[in-house]
Amino acid sequence: MNWLGVFRLGLVQMALGAIVVLTTSTLNRVMVLELALPALVPGLLVALHHAVQLARPRLGFGADVGGRCTPWIIGGMAVLGAGGALAALGVAWAGTDRAAGLVLVTLAYALVGLGVAGGGTALLVLLAKRVPEGRRAGAATVVWMMMIAGFAITAGLAGRWLDPYSPARLVAVSSGVSLLAWLVTVLAVWGVEKASTAAAPAPAAKEHPDFRAALREVWSEPVARRFTIFVAVSMLAFSAQDLILEPFAGVVFGLGPGATTQLSGVQHGGVFAGMLAAGLAGRRAFGSLRAWTVGGCLASALALAGLCAAGFIGGAWPLHATVFALGVANGAFSIAAIGSMMRLAGAGRPGREGTRMGLWGAAQAIAFGGGGLLGAVASDLVRLAVPSPGEAYAIVFGAEALLFIVAARLAAAIEPASAVQGKAGDPWQRPITPTMPS
């Protein structure tokens, strides 16, 4: 697959992000403000969306058995789009019938999680199978930055289209975005998989045991098992600061809502910079996937140590620079980890790429969904025991830094040097050297 093919699959990720951002931000706001529901309600719905993604291994196994990813991408995006439209309809319905509307919303968020699991897993499997080894870090950068662009573009346009707000307008905008996202997906993936792959018969049944047997087989692979644990620990550390960074800045540094929102923007800007750095480094043959993954985790731990210091020192600490550094480190480690995921999906018995990718996606979803909640609960509990708010937050940031150190150690041990001696072509060890298409 050349860079044009990568860009086409990036359009799918952008479409996915366009639907998800409406359910996790716009509908969240409407439920809390327009419907006066407790913030716990959208929080539980988002948690449900992550929990449903435990189905990723099963959906990835389905792609393995079928031998094609395109039907799973198109079908997953159809389910995701239906979930996004039904979620908006349920929120609008809840304005007149609270109970019935919330039942529909709950079903819709489950569909959103299922669609993300099916379409997102198959998309990663297709990238892992079709992108050459040297281009994987760059491909991960392109695809994930396009997803973030989908977040930003949809949030901006939807904000204009929803003004002045009405329930009917909310349903129309969400349904329109879902339909457009699905159409973009169909056009983007059409013909990406080679005709030879499409025409190949499904593997014989004996090559594909039942799902439980396939999952046990993948879990028995040392590399797959270690990488699963790494993904869970690193994403737990990555997401644990999501819900406490802005409150920390408000309590310790006295920043208002607008200022803390800008601080969050500084962090996201750092994430973009880190992603670009990891992607461009590959083109210059600077570093390896192992180095960027381990280094990004350690740099994240160092930035969190800076936030620990900020909790003790207070206003004199350069908060914005520390948060930007945290974003850069997070972005660099994320892209390197995704590139590693794409490579390691094919490490092991052939025909299990989807099952491996699904296993790692499930670990990521559960850790990401639980990380924010765990960080918020931990900060509340520590503040009950520690009188100083700054010191209480510092303890939580310190615990997250330790998690990143553990993640770095796990990343370094996924494939010990002794296990890959003699593999001169192993990109986990050698510098990443993408080849641009002619």
Image (cartoon, helix red, strand yellow):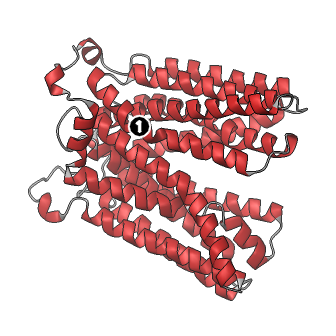
**Figure label count:** 1
User: Residue 349: horizontal and vertical position, in percent?
Assistant: 17, 39
Residue 20, quarter of the rendered image: top right
Neighbourhood count class around disc 1 (C-alpha, 10 Å): few under 14, some 14–19, many 20 upward:
many
User: Residue 188: horizontal and vertical position, in percent?
Assistant: 49, 22
Determine the residue positioned at 50% across, 38% down: 52
Which quadrant holds the C terminus?
top left
- Which residue is at the front of the view, 44 or 350? 44
Q: Is residue 57 left or right of residue 388?
A: left
Determine the residue positioned at 51% across, 71% down: 400
Q: Secondary structure at mark 1?
A: helix
Determine the residue positioned at 67% across, 75% down: 319
Residue at the left extreme of this rendering: 422
User: Residue 376: horizontal and vertical position, in percent?
Assistant: 64, 65
**Residue labelled with disc 1:** 56
- Which residue is at the front of the view, 149 or 276? 149
Determine the residue positioned at 74% across, 38% down: 27
100 is higher (above) or lower (below) than 276: above
Residue at the top extreme of this rendering: 199
Which quadrant holds the N terminus?
top left
201 is higher (above) or lower (below) than 272: above
Q: Is residue 54 left or right of residue 307?
A: left
Residue at the right extreme of this rendering: 164
